Amino acid sequence: MATLLTKQQTEALIGRSLTTVESTNFDLYLKIAIARLEDLLCTTLTSPLDPVMQLLLARCFGAISLEQNATADANITSKKVEDFSVTYGDKDGSPMEAFVKQNANDLEHYSECQAKIRQGKVCHDDSVRLLWLR
């Protein structure tokens, strides 16, 4: 399988250099990102990807890296004692939840998950053939 995204493309699309851990584990993180994005889109990613799909894949890669650094308190948004407060997580939930929220329009646009049955037809062997409409 051809590489869907290089390290250099990933850095350009996420707007920062890869960390040492990301660079060392690039192939593994990319495979996980591909699997998650394919699951979200109900499709198989093939090369070459258009620029928006490259951006989605790079951002998914970034979310996986953030998940690796998450702590047990990541979902705590703030704590306050008297007049002192500290904010621990972010309001978007997990990094993957934030990725889905931030990229909802593009994910919906590329999704193959939303097919609807237009009509069914009984075939000669008593099986049902479905005609799909997107």
Image: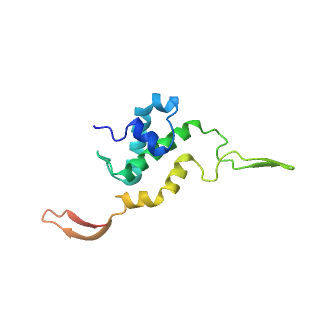
Relative to 18, residue 45 above or below: below
Quarter of the image where the N terminus is located: top left
Q: Is residue 124 left or right of residue 10?
A: left
Residue 91 x, y percent position in the rendering? 64, 53
Question: At x 21% / y 64%, what residue is drawn?
Answer: 129
Question: At x 55% / y 51%, what residue is drawn?
Answer: 98
Residue 96 x, y percent position in the rendering? 52, 48
Q: Is residue 112 left or right of residue 63?
A: left
Residue 108 x, y percent position in the rendering? 41, 60
Relative to 115, residue 67 above or below: above
Question: At x 37% / y 51%, what residue is drawn?
Answer: 51
Of residues 27 and 123, which is closer to you in this image?
Answer: 27
Rendered image coloring scheme: rainbow
Q: How many marks?
A: 0
Of residues 69 and 12, which is closer to you in this image?
Answer: 12
Residue 14 x, y percent position in the rendering? 48, 44
Quarter of the image where the C terminus is located: bottom left
Q: Is residue 125 left or right of residue 78?
A: left
In this view, the residue farthest toward the bottom is: 119
Relative to 71, residue 96 above or below: below
In this view, the residue farthest toward the right is: 82
Of residues 67 and 24, which is closer to you in this image?
Answer: 24
Of residues 60 and 10, which is closer to you in this image?
Answer: 10
